[in-house]
Amino acid sequence: MSLRPTQVNFDETWAGLSKTVQAVLTLRPVARAEWNGRFSDVYSLCVAQPEPLADRLYRELKELLQKHVSALRRKLAKLPDRELLQQYHQAWEFYNTGVSYLNQLFRYLNQQHIQKRRAVEPDLMYSSDADLTQLECPLEVGELAMELWRREMIISTESRLIPQLLAAYAADRDGDSRNSDALAAAVRSLVAVEQFAPASNRDSLHLYRTIFEKRLLEASAQVYRQRAAKLLQHGDAAHYVKAVSAFLREETERARRLLHQTSVSRFRQRCEQHLVSDHLQFLQEECQRATRAEDRVALGSAYPLLRGVPAGAVVMREELEKLVKERGLNEVWPASGQAPAPADFVSNVLNILERYHDLVIDAFLGDSSFTAALDRAVSRVVNHRLQPNTPCPAPEILARHCDTLLRRTGNTVDTELDEQLARAVAVFKYLDDKDVFQKFYARMLAKRLIFQHSLSMEAEEAMIGRLKQCCGCEFTSKFHRMFLDVSVSSDLNRKFEDAIPPAPGSASFSVQVLQAGAWPLNPAPISPFAPPEDLQKRLQSFESFYRHLFNGRKLTWLYHLCQGEVRLGYLKKPYVVSQ
C-alpha cells in the first residue's frame, strides 16, 4: 500500500466499499484481506488527487446508513406489537455491533477530516467573512449512525416501542421474564444513541428519562399504591413490614438488572415513598410496640425500611431512648430512694448498657444515631438525682467503688482487677460531674497512699492512666504529684538513715513529705499528742536534715495521720499494738 496521494475512481472504490459496509451492518462474514483493503480505500479517497474526496465519501456513507435504518424501521412497522420488542432487540444488537466496526474502518475519515473541521469551524464562526448558513459541524461515523437510529428507530416508533417496554417491565414484575433481555437491550439503546454524541451538548440521559423512565415511574407508582393498599387489608404490621421489605428488594434488583444505573435510586425512593412514607404512622406504631417488647426480629425488619425515608427512624430512636431511661432508672436506683451499693450501681449500669447496646447492633445495625440515643439515655440514668435540689450521688458512689477495688483486700487477682477497673471507667465516661468524682477519688487515693492500703502501685497507676485517657493530663496532674511525693519520700528516708543512723534500740520511723497543694488533706487539728522523748529527738534530727537539704521549706507534722506500732514483750506471748 502506497501512502502517496494518487487519482482515485470514486465510483469504483465506493462500489466495493459500500458492499463491505452493508455486510458489516448485517454482521455477514468479511474476509480479512477484503477488510484490510477497505482501510486503504478510505485512506486513498481522503487524500485523493487532485482533490480529496472525503466530503463525497461522507455523504455517500450517510445516505447508505439512512437507507439501511429506514429499511429496518419499515420492517418493524409491519410487525404486530407482540413481536416488536424482540425484533427491535435483534436489529439493535446487529446494528450496534456493526457500527462499532464501521467506526474503526472509517477512523482515518474521523480523525483527519471530521475532527479537523470541528476544530476549525468554531473559529470561522467569529470571522466576518464566514457564511454561517454553510457551516455544519459533521458527526463522526459512529455518532452519525447513532443519530440516525435515534431519529428513525426510536423517535419515529416511540408510540409503539415505549408501551412495549412498559409492558415488558410489568410482565417481569409479575414473574414473566421472556422479554426481559430485550427490554434491557432496548433501554441500553436509549442511552447509547445519546452518549455517542458528545459534541451535541445534549444530556446523555435526556431521551431515556423523558420518553421512558418518567412514564415507567408513573406506572410503577400506581403499582406501589395498589400493593400497599392490598397489604394493609391484612391489618398485620409484622406481615406488612416483611412483605414490603421483600418487595423493595425485588424492585431494587429489577431496576438494577433492567434499567440504567441512575434509575435504581429513583425507583427505590418512589417505592419507599408509597409503601413506607405514606404509611409512616402505621409503621412507627408497630416499631414502638416492638421496641417496648425488645423484639429484635421485628425491629431488624422495620429498621431498613424506615431509615431510608425522612424522619422514618426518629420515632424508633426516641422510643429507644425513652425505654432505656425508664428501665435504667428502675434497675439502677432503688425504689427506697437510698443510694445503691457501689458495686451494684456499676454492675446495673453496665448491664443496661450492654443489653441495649446488643439491641442496637442486632436490630439497628449499629447505627450511630441509635448509639448516640443509647448514650444519652444511659447518661440520664447515671446522673440521676435522688431529690430535685440535691447533688447527683453517682460521682461519690463510683469513687467509693474504685476505692474498694484498689484497697488491699487480698481477694482480687490482676486479671479480675483490670476488668473491674475497665468497667468502672466505662461508667465514669457517662458522669457529668467529673470534677466531683475527681475530688472524692483524690481524697480516697490520699488515704490509700498515706496508710499504705493500696493493693499495688501498678494498679493505682493503671487506673490513673485510664482516667488520663478519658479526661487528659490536667485531670490527673494532682494524682501524679501525689505519686511523686510518695516516691521522693521513700528516697528521702533512705538518705536520712544513711546520714544519721538511729541509735541501737531506739525507735525507728519513716516520714512521708507531702506537698500541701497536691494532697487533699485537712489542716492539722490542735492535738494534745506529744511524741515520746526518744522519738522526739529523732524527729528533730529529721527536721535538721531536711532544712539542710531544702533551705526555706517548713515542715508541718500531721500527727492525726500517723500510724505507730508498739511491740509488747512482757507477756507470755509477744504482741504488736498498732494505731
Image: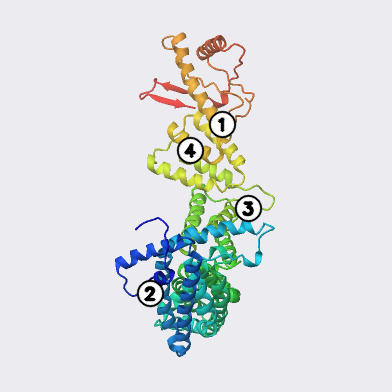
| Circle 2 residue | 19
Q: Secondary structure at mark 2?
A: helix
Kind of residue indicated by mark 1: Ser
Residue 285 horizontal/vertical position (percent) = 58, 73
Report if the CB atoms under discs 4 and 1 are less than 8 Å apart. no
Q: Which residue is mark 1?
A: 477
For marks 3 and 1, give the one nearer the viewer.
1
Mark 2 to mark 1: distance in Å? Answer: 92 Å
Mark 3 is on which residue type? Leu
Q: Is residue 386 above or below residue 58?
A: above
**Marks 4/1: CA–CA distance:** 13 Å
Q: CA gap, disc 3 to disc 4? A: 28 Å
User: Eyeballing the image, is 521 above or below 382?
Assistant: above
Distance of label 4 from label 2 (alpha carbons): 89 Å
The quadrant of the image that shows the N terminus is bottom left
Of the two numbered discs 2 and 3 in the rendering, the one whose residue sits closer to the viewer: 2
| Front-most of residues 349 and 13 | 13
Whether residue 261 is visible, yes or no, is no
Is residue 283 in view from this perspective?
yes
Q: Give the percent coordinates (x, y) of residue 278.
A: 60, 76
Q: Earlier in the sequence, mark 2 or mark 3?
A: 2
- Circle 4: is it few (<14), some (14-19), or many (20+) Cα within 10 Å? some
For the residue pair 554 and 271, the one nearer the viewer reads as 271
Residue 463's mark? Answer: 4
Q: Secondary structure at mark 1?
A: helix
User: Nearer the N terminus, badge 3 or badge 4?
Assistant: 3
Q: CA distance from mark 3 to mark 1?
A: 32 Å
Residue designated by label 3: 386
Q: Amino acid at mark 2?
A: Lys
